[in-house]
Structure formats: C-alpha cells, structure tokens
Image: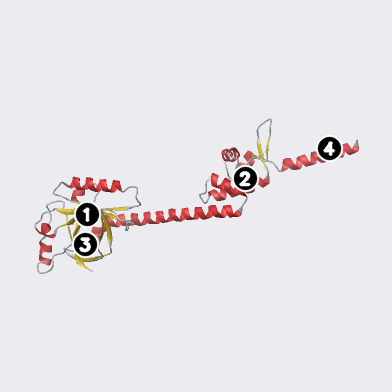
Amino acid sequence: MENLFVKNNDIFKKGCEIMKKLYTIGETSKLLGVTTQTLRHYDKIKLVEPTYIDEETGYRYYTFDKFHYIDRIKYLQSFGMDLEEIKKVIHSGNVDSLLHFLDLQSEKKKKELKKLEDMLKDMEWYRDYFTYFRDEHIQESIYKIHLPNRYILKVPCYDEELYDMEIRLAEKKSSLKNKEIVYRRQYGYKIDYQHLCNKVFRPTDYFVYLREKPTENMEYYEVLPAGEYLCTNMKILTNLWDPKNIQDYFENKNVPLIVLAMEYEDNLVEYNQANYEIQFYLGT
C-alpha cells in the first residue's frame, strides 16, 4: 500500500513539473511579443503547433522548447521571408536549406535597395529640374555648358498641333510599358536652326528623357551626344522670344547641326508658359 502511495506521489510530482513547463497561449503571446491570433495561425498551417491542447476546453499550451522556434520565425520574418518559406526551412531541419533562402532573400533586398537608391536620385533630379532656372549663370543671355550623353525616346513631328505630338509620344511610351525603361519627366524638341532664326517653332522631333541607356535596341531611341552646348532660354511656346542674340553669335560661324529646346517648368499649371533652354551643339 505504501509503495502504491509513493508511486502515485511520484506521478503527481512529475505531472506538476510538466504543468510548470506549460504556458498558456496568452502567456506565450506576452512573453514572445506575438499575438494569440498569430500563434493560432502558426498552428493552423502546422508551422508551430502547441505542445498540449486541453480536450475539454480547447486551450492551447506551449513548452519552453517551442519558444525557440517562434523566436526564430520572428527573426526570419524580419528579413522579409514569408511563412511558407520559413515553414520549408524549419521542417527541413537543414542548415543548407536556410542558407539557400537567406541567399535568395539577400539578392531580393539588394534589388529593392537599388530601386530605392534610383528613386532617390530621380527625386533629386526632379527637384533640380524645377529649380534649374534659379542658377545665376542661367540669367545670362548666352552661356555655355558641358553635358554628358543623354538618352531619349522620340517621335517625329509634322506640321501639326502640339497635342498630336504628345499623343503619339504617349502611345509610343505605352507600347513599351512591359520593357524595363524608366523615364525622367523632362520633355523637349529637336528644332531646325533656320526655322528658329525666322521665329518659327516647327520641331522635327518630340522626345522625353530616359534615365539610362536601354539594354536592347528599340525604335525611336536616340543618344544626344556629349559635348559643349551654347545655350539661351526662351518661352518658345509663346511669341515672347527673340532669336537675335543667337543669330549674332552664329553669324560668321558654322550653323549648329543639333538644336534642342529643353523644357523646364516653373509652375504646375501653365505648361505653355514654361521656360525652355535652347541648346546648340558645338562639338566635343
């Protein structure tokens, strides 16, 4: 009888020890900084199941060893890994499987970082675009600047209204939407020197900037050459401009083969009143 008492007492003690190691779902949630809904979802997808579920109440209980897995899941999620990826890694029990997913996630984050860096550069570029005409040298009637290669997507212009050119360029951009082409929102025109001197705005091409050189050949793509450009500024979409200073400059010189009118908006409403920097290519 005494032996039976001792045996039952030992079982009771072991049961108490086990119960001391069990934590309710609420306690586990608070200790590990995850919601009870999250723990139930882990159980549902068989990522981390409770150590014990009371059959009568349905209450979930966790032991300390489960904390290790939950903590690792949180850590891997901080790297951007989704639960399905984490489930594959944990269930494999293989370090090489974890390394594989870490390598994949690292490459993904590098691409995301590059995209963010490019976006910051574009934002800085766009800010400079709106403040360009505030620079002191721009206030001079004629000035020279040196420019790198620039990349454009263009459409030919005919004797037509401006909106016709804009629609055709928009259609061209739309046709390339599945290609990895990033535009910088600056528009411009290639214009004929003689027409300009006669105060006639008749562009030969209408274009938009590309952030970088395309990785494949495409129609209507062009490189504007690097080199020195003579510049002046005019509101070329109005009648309030005078080409005399340009005519005087080139009077005894070779006529420039490339003339560009680059748009620089200074407001968000009347784009027809925008300033244009007229760039005359002088060579390298």
Q: Earlier in the sequence, mark 2 or mark 1?
A: 2
Relative to 226, residue 178 above or below? above
The residue lying furthest to the right in this view is: 1
- Depth check, mark 4 against mark 1: the one in front is 1
Query: Split into 4 quadrants, where in the image is the C terminus?
Result: bottom left
Could you say where residue 64 lies in the image, as x and y percent from the top left? 67, 46
Q: CA distance from mark 2 to mark 3?
A: 63 Å
Could you say where residue 114 lies in the image, as x and y percent from the top left? 41, 56
Q: Residue at image x 56%, y 55%? A: 99
Relative to 247, residue 263 above or below? above
Identify residue for label 1.
188
Q: Earlier in the sequence, mark 4 or mark 3?
A: 4
Q: Earlier in the sequence, mark 1 or mark 3?
A: 3
Mark 3 residue type: Ile
Identify residue for label 2.
31
Q: CA distance from mark 2 to mark 4?
A: 34 Å
Q: Which mark is residue 138?
A: 3
Identify residue for label 4.
8
